[in-house]
């Protein structure tokens, strides 16, 4: 180990590795983008590091700007939680000498993809993303003169062959077998000709039902799956899935999606049919949950096959038995990744009741209302309210009376938050940990599950759909919640949660539905959306619900009384720029003697605007420093776990510590983005002006002063730009621009903060106008503030 830690750093460079020759090229207008992804071996040859084993996958880009205006690359669009270049170097520092680490840091810094591509210019470099096996699918957005350019790349990697690449689709059916249908003809085929279910290889045993039908080209289907973060599989894997047959064939493609924090999976089996609608292929599919579980309970349940009573018991309690919940999840996944053009239901799969479940030849026990979900896939990204509803079948609420009863569940407390729009009224409440224990009889918070009570009143005449995925993209079904909270198998445990949940998505006209959606835990303030969607209409509401339990730092600050009225000054734009540029460059220690991190942010907005912006973007509040929070911080450091509300040390501006601190946790407590903000005495257009500091924590190190402290990424401008993209994509930025005030510190001559970490910067402050209402990306104004100065302000 000592020998390894003493070696110099040496990278091969791009000319020694041939992956750029595989680049996929796309063009829109005068913008040309080339993208390629090196394999694990190519990455190691290029960088000298085994990044794949660390979950890091470089993406190489080259952007040629043939226009007369500069263009901005939005790295956030490629991977919201991408790794910064110097962060990657820091993760690998222990392998090298001090000089070797400095050389490595310089290499990563110099070979990173820049954000700005000048007019008539070209730029290339690497973006460090999270590893994805198989085809690397990602979006790439460029922003220029108020226009957003959206690219989608699907980059195959050598060494992995997806199962569908081995299928010769053009040879599956002879030309005379291809049947052109309209939508009515498709419905007839699905209800009267297509078998309910797959079969085994001998065609004598019944498999799982064909419960979902997709219409779209192979490329459109593939893009939809990758946009929805589904994983491809190779023909040599998931062998049990390949025992299902349609027309004697194993699935042409198998995709699956999994939880990172559990054993639940959802699978999709696909077969191409000989049918075409409007010239587009029709695919039959099976979508269902399954568990990757080797626990004694799971092994016991696998031995129940053939015992009808035991199988019925299993169906009542199992995550995997409820096919309709999987179907609902799949529909929402397509809807929210912009792939849904039209949807509806037809009969054909056959109803299987919970009291008389069916068992396939593979031993899977299931029940279903028997409807087939029909999805027409969009060739371009579709908005939520652009999806059309087809066919005239309305699914019943649920045949089980207990579920109907569950839709009348009362709120957990009197802390209701209500919003209305048009004919829709939505009320929400979030029970605390202790309230949850009383309601459900168990500590769901301890299992990582937080119930949210939602009541939807549809006063209109159109059927609407409540989408749990709007509240949490990784929401738990009632049965997943039951599975995670199960202490022992007892009849009715799953029903205990289903009776209280939103069991189905439909909200009928002139009706009220109420129940719980089971989400991941958010302590402090629970921020979430509730989307209720109809044909041509979408009600999108954001809620911010305080949850008792945490001691948050900003609760101690009375922002309304920080300054007496005689100190508050209203300023115009020129005065604003001049005043803010004269504010301190950096934070201070308590004594005011030493300068620390640069104050590189300025916000304009009411406190609720800041709150809305950061909560909507997934940032978390910060706990005060006290005994319990220190213990949680220590525990998360030793276990490499996440502590989303970890305390932030006090730094000073205007002779006081920060008014609030916010953070966005990443892999562990050692890795996070965090910021501090202070209200200034300035008001612009009647709204408060705030100054702040942001940095990216990339590790923890020991110091003489504080024993331990976070190590920051020295490229503080990278973190500043990340924040801009994060807030803009959360639709909370009205306008932005840049001003001076920090002072330049270049890479070769950095400055240091209060704990001795170096940093470099272009010296600019990012000025952000925040909005409490959603602002589309194409509506964000880019403000040129270079013409404003203190002299200009004084001459007004």
Image (cartoon, helix red, strand yellow):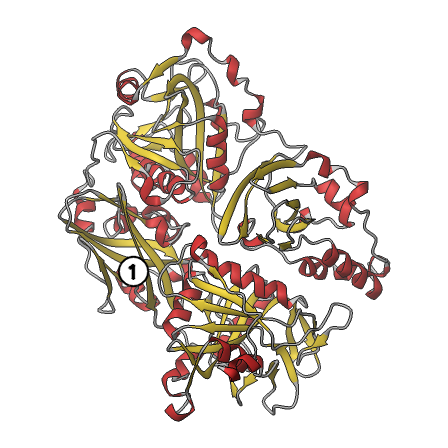
Q: Residues within 10 Å of mark 1 (few under 14, many from 20)?
A: few
Q: Name which quarter of the figure residue 541 lies in.
A: bottom left
Q: Position of residue 495 (x, y in %)?
A: 26, 47
Q: Position of residue 474 (x, y in %)?
A: 42, 50
Q: Position of residue 260 (x, y in %)?
A: 50, 49
Q: Position of residue 660 (x, y in %)?
A: 47, 77
Looking at the image, residue 434 lies above or below residue 465: below
Looking at the image, residue 174 lies above or below residue 1: above
Report whether 424 appears left or right of 23: left
Residue 370 seen anywhere in this rendered image of the structure:
no
Report whether 285 appears left or right of 411: right
Q: Residue furthest left?
A: 510
Residue 705 seen anywhere in this rendered image of the structure:
yes
Report whether 168 appears left or right of 314: right
Report whether 696 appears left or right of 534: right
Q: Name which quarter of the figure residue 608 lies in.
A: bottom left
Identified at 64% across, 75% down, the residue is 709
**Which SS class for mark 1?**
loop
Which residue is identified by label 1? Answer: 441
Q: Quadrant of the N terminus?
A: bottom right
């Amino acid at each position: 180990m000592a020998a390894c830690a003493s070696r110099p750093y040496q990278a091969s460079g791009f000319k020694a590795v041939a992956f750029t020759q595989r680049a996929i090229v796309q063009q829109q207008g005068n913008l040309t983008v080339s993208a390629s992804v090196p394999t694990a071996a190519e990455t190691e040859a290029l960088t000298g590091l085994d990044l794949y084993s660390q979950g890091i996958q470089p993406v190489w880009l080259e952007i040629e700007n043939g226009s007369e205006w500069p263009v901005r690359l939005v790295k956030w669009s490629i991977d919201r939680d991408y790794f910064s270049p110097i962060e990657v170097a820091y993760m690998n520092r222990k392998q090298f000498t001090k000089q070797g680490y400095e050389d490595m840091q310089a290499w990563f810094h110099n070979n990173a993809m820049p954000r700005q591509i000048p007019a008539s210019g070209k730029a290339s470099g690497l973006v460090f993303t999270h590893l994805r096996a198989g085809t690397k699918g990602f979006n790439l957005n460029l922003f220029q003169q108020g226009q957003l350019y959206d690219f989608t790349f699907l980059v195959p990697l050598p060494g992995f062959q997806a199962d569908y690449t081995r299928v010769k689709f053009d040879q599956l059916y002879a030309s005379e077998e291809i049947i052109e249908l309209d939508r009515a003809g498709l419905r007839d085929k699905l209800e009267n000709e297509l078998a309910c279910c797959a079969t085994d290889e001998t065609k004598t045993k019944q498999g799982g039902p064909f419960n979902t039908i997709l219409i779209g080209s192979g490329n459109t289907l593939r893009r939809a799956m990758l946009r929805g973060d589904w994983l491809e599989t190779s023909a040599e894997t998931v062998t049990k899935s390949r025992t299902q047959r349609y027309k004697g064939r194993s699935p042409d493609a198998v995709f699956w999606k999994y939880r990172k924090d559990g054993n639940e999976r959802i699978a999709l089996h696909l077969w191409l049919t000989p049918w075409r609608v409007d010239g587009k292929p029709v695919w039959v599919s099976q979508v269902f949950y399954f568990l990757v579980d080797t626990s004694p309970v799971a092994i016991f349940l696998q031995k129940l096959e053939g015992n009808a009573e035991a199988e019925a018991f299993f169906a009542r309690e199992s995550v995997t038995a409820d096919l309709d919940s999987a179907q609902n999840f799949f529909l929402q996944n397509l809807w929210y990744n912009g792939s849904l053009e039209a949807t509806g239901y037809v009969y054909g799969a056959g109803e299987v009741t919970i009291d008389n479940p069916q068992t396939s030849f593979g031993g899977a026990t299931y029940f279903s209302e028997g409807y087939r979900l029909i999805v027409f896939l969009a060739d371009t990204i579709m908005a939520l309210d652009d999806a059309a509803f087809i066919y005239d079948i309305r699914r019943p609420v649920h045949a089980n009376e207990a579920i109907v009863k569950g839709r009348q569940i009362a709120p957990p407390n009197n802390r209701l938050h209500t919003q209305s729009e048009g004919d829709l009224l939505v009320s929400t409440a979030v029970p605390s940990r202790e309230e949850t224990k009383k309601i459900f009889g168990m500590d769901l918070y301890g299992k990582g599950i937080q119930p949210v009570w939602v009541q939807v009143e549809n006063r209109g005449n159109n059927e609407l759909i409540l989408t749990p995925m709007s509240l949490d993209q990784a929401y738990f079904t009632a049965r997943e919640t039951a599975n995670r909270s199960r202490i022992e198998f007892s009849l009715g445990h799953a029903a205990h949660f289903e009776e209280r949940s939103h069991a189905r998505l439909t909200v009928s006209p002139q009706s009220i539905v109420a129940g719980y959606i089971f989400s991941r835990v958010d302590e402090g303030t629970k921020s979430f959306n509730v989307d209720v969607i109809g044909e041509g209409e979408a009600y999108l509401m954001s809620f911010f619900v305080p949850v008792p339990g945490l001691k948050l730092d900003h609760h101690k600050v009375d922002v309304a009384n920080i300054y007496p009225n005689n100190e508050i000054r209203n300023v115009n734009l020129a005065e604003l720029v001049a005043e803010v540029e004269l504010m301190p460059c950096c934070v201070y220690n308590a004594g005011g003697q030493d300068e620390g991190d640069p104050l590189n942010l300025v916000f304009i907005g009411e406190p609720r605007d800041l709150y809305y912006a950061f909560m909507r973007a997934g940032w978390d509040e910060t706990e005060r420093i006290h005994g319990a929070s220190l213990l949680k911080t220590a525990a998360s450091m030793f276990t490499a776990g996440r502590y989303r509300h970890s305390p932030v040390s006090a730094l000073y501006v205007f002779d006081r510590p920060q008014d609030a601190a916010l953070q966005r946790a990443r892999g562990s407590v050692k890795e996070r983005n965090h910021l501090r903000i202070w209200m200034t005495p300035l008001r612009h257009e009647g709204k408060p002006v705030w100054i702040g500091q942001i940095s990216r924590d990339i590790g923890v190190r020991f110091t003489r002063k504080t024993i331990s402290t976070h190590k920051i990424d020295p490229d503080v401008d990278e973190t500043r730009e990340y924040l801009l993209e994060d807030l803009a994509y959360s639709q909370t930025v009205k306008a932005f621009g840049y001003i001076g005030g920090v002072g330049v510190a270049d890479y070769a001559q950095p400055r240091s903060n209060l704990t001795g970490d170096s940093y470099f910067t272009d010296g600019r402050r990012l000025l952000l106008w925040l909005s409490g209402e959603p602002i589309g990306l194409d509506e964000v104004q880019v403000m040129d503030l270079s013409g404003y100065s203190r002299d200009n302000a004084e001459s007004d």
